[in-house]
Image (cartoon, rainbow, N blue to C red):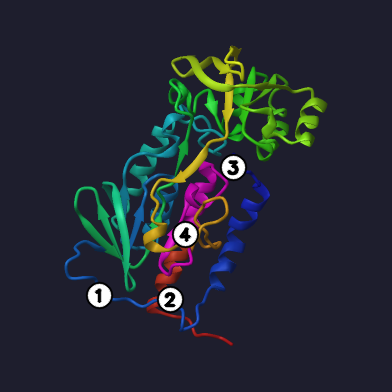
Amino acid sequence: MQHCCNCKILAIFAFSDFYYYIMNQVPDNSQRTTSKASNSTVNNTHEVIIIGGSYSGMQAALTLGRALRQVLIIDAGKPCNRFAPQAHNLLGSEGTPPAELHQNARKQIAAYPGIQLLEDQVVNVYKQQDTFIIHTASGQRYSTAFLVMAAGLQDILPDIDGVWECWGKSIIHCPYCHGYEFKGARTALLISSDRDLHMVSMLKQWTPQLQVIVTDERSLSAPSLSFLRREKISLIQGRLTAVKHEDGQLQSISLKDATGKINTIYLEVLYILPQIKQSLDLQATLGYQLTDSGHIKVDEGRRTNIPGLYAVGDNSSRFRSLSQAIASGMAAGAMINFDLIQKTRPLPVVH
């Protein structure tokens, strides 16, 4: 589960603070990147290329398009929230289907002549001097000095029939996105260790009907078990083996205990804390740094440790939400425009 900290997000992305941050990013001459001619065998050179055309990628493109930049978005068409019937906790668009949000965003960026959208899948990227070379599944190659990674994350779910059909509907991971719709509902939380226990306290805010499921009670520490008893939360041991649902609405789950007995639990919603992986893993070829949680490490302007490479959205933040994705895209767009200006009209280095 991704942790939430709205105060921190607001502090980072308050415009005045971010503008001040950008204006203090004048690089010294030794770190400033310079333009190089693209490889003669590579076609389609662009000022900025964005890999991923969901909310963070399109917002970065919008910010750059409004700054009169030439931008190419390469999008595989698989946004992470495509499984959810509605998007929540997004001011001004509460309850709107993600597909409608996505379609509206595409229409809006299409109004800017500098923004081009390409439906294709990136399969590899490498850097040649100061130029990124992007290879796509269709066999095309593109080049740019400024690359934004916005391909997001993939959730790794249990390989059980019905899980994907319910994912984003009644099997979920975030109460801030969907918890209100299940307030007071029969709820279970599937955990694997002590580190997941924070979700127990959190979910009690939405429902008193909470059960915790763990494959093996021995994976929990004595303080954790004591906490569950003190909070009067039932702990069920068992391995998830089956999901019963109707059109994605959970009805019950089956658990196999250590003796092989199958127990049926009737539920309205199941919270799962899935493992994640990068949708487009280029760490081996590009060499960008990762955080301990496996996200791409960036600064407040969404720069990675690789000059010219930026990351936005879920791939570089523990805060998985549409508002965060949009905010990160705006930050990257503004930072890239500033860095492009520094290449052609650099400010003096003041000591």
Instruction: Tell me the mark number nearer the camera, choosing from 2 and 1.
Output: 1
What number is the disc on residue 144?
A: none
Residue for point 34% across, 72% down? 130
Left or right, residue 238 beside residue 243 = right
Which sits earlier in the primary sequence, circle 1 or circle 4? 1
The vertical placement of 199 against 237, above or below, is below
Q: As drawn, which residue projects farthest toward the front?
A: 259
Can residue 46 be seen by looking at this rendering?
no
Instruction: Tell me the mark number nearer the camera, choosing from 4 and 3.
Output: 3
Residue on which the image places disc 3: 2
CA distance separating discs 3 and 1: 42 Å
Residue on which the image places disc 1: 37
Which sits earlier in the primary sequence, circle 2 or circle 4? 4
> Considering depth in this image, is 334 or 224 the residue closer to the camera?
224
The residue stretch that appears in magenta: 304-333
Instruction: Tell me the mark number nearer the camera, choosing from 2 and 3.
Output: 3
Disc 3 marks a residue whose amino acid type is Gln
Residue on which the image places disc 4: 332
CA distance separating discs 4 and 3: 21 Å
CA distance separating discs 2 and 1: 18 Å
> Considering depth in this image, is 336 or 208 the residue closer to the camera?
208
Q: Residues within 10 Å of mark 1 (few under 14, many from 20)?
A: few
Disc 4 marks a residue whose amino acid type is Ala
Residue on which the image places disc 2: 342
Residue for point 49% across, 42% down? 276
> Considering depth in this image, is 286 or 209 the residue closer to the camera?
286
